[in-house]
């Protein structure tokens, strides 16, 4: 009798434990199903964002062959990332987070290309207009130029050449957030271009603008978001940064700073320095 009572109590205890286990397993299953559902929605959203980015890249067009090559490379990166997202299980949260970061990088790069293409299109329109106007002015002035004496032309040419302000010792460095030089791309916040304007006593005194054109490792000109065009020796170009100084004929050191709208990457950066008279110098910088 005593044994039957103990056996009955044991059966009841096991039944209670089994019931508790069943409840726990059901809760775990429901919770896991909900998590998988959330991750599936996240993957679908990421896929849709990738498709939208792919469509945006397909609308970018330009007549610049070098820029077209770079755009094709970025389109290929988008396609590859989209395929990786499709092949990745929704439960692989770590991978999906990595793909989200890559998507953000590709978006930033695309914004830079949009700015570059807009600048090139605007520049082409301006160049065509200026070329037409210059051609008309040249035709009207041709007769007057032909009447000028040879000796007067030669004298004017010598004076013009002699009055051109020249540069030397161009140097390009990267500056970090502590305003110190660095060779690390991840720490760079701006680029600093310095050079000396050579002494010239017959040059015009007063305000003098220095323009810098910075190109990244991909060879693409780096600019700010607004349109920035200048004329140097009769040629229109886009500049990255500009500084106006007061030139009084003596040798003068000048530094121009440029802060990129996109992160700096590893590679060789190139700067070309101009005035409205012509090119003043060039320099390179390797960021690790």
Image (cartoon, rainbow, N blue to C red):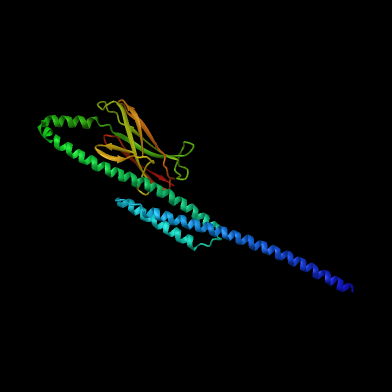
- Asked if residue 79 can be seen in this view, the reply is yes
| Figure label count | 0
Residue 279 can be seen in this image: no
> Relative to 131, is 151 above or below?
above
Residue 94 image position (x, y, % from top left): 55, 57
Q: Could you say which is closer to the camera, residue 78 or residue 281?
A: 78
Say which quarter of the image contains residue 120: top left
**249 displayed left or right of 175:** left
Question: Whole-percent x and y of residue 190?
Answer: 43, 39
Indicate the position of residue 61 as horizontal and vertical percent values.
33, 52
Q: Nearer the viewer, residue 34 or 96?
A: 34
From the viewer's perspective, tell me whether residue 20 is left or right of residue 236: right
Q: Residue at x 78, y 68 (%)?
A: 14
The relative height of residue 61 versus residue 168 in the rendered view (above or below) is: below
- How far across and down, in percent of the image, does residue 84 sit? 47, 61
In depth, the one of 259 and 81 nearer the eye is: 81
- Name the side, left or right, on which 7 lies relative to 206: right
Q: Where's the N terminus, which quadrant? A: bottom right
- Identify the residue at image location x=57%, y=60%: 37
Image quadrant assignment for residue 242: top left
Is 213 in front, or is 114?
114
Q: Residue at x 67, y 61 (%)?
A: 27
Q: Is residue 268 above or below residue 231?
A: below
- The residue lying furthest to the right in this view is 1
């Amino acid at each position: 009798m005593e044994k039957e009572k103990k056996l009955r109590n044991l059966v009841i205890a096991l039944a209670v434990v089994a019931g508790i286990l069943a409840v726990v397993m059901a809760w775990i299953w429901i919770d896991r199903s909900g998590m998988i559902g959330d991750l599936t929605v996240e993957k679908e959203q990421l896929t849709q964002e990738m498709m939208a980015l792919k469509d945006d890249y397909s609308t970018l067009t330009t007549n610049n062959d070098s820029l077209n090559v770079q755009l094709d490379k970025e389109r290929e990166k988008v396609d590859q990332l989209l395929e990786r997202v499709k092949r990745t299980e929704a439960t692989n949260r770590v991978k999906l987070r990595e793909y989200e970061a890559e998507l953000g990088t590709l978006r930033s790069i695309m914004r830079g290309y949009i700015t570059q293409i807009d600048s090139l299109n605007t520049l082409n329109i301006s160049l065509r207009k200026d070329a037409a106007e210059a051609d008309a002015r040249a035709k009207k002035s041709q007769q007057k130029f032909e009447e000028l004496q040879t000796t007067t032309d030669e004298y004017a040419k010598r004076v013009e050449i002699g009055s051109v302000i020249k540069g030397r010792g161009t140097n390009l460095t990267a500056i970090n957030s502590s305003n110190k030089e660095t060779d690390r791309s991840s720490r760079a916040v701006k680029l600093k271009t310095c050079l000396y304007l050579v002494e010239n006593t017959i040059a015009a005194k007063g305000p003098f603008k220095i323009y810098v054109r910075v190109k990244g490792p991909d060879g693409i000109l780096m600019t700010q978001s607004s349109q920035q065009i200048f004329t140097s020796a009769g040629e229109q170009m886009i500049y990255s940064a500009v500084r106006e100084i007061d030139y009084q004929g003596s040798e003068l050191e000048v530094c121009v700073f440029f802060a990129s709208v996109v992160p700096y990457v590893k590679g060789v950066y190139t700067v070309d320095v101009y005035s409205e008279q012509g090119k003043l110098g060039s320099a390179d910088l390797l960021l690790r």
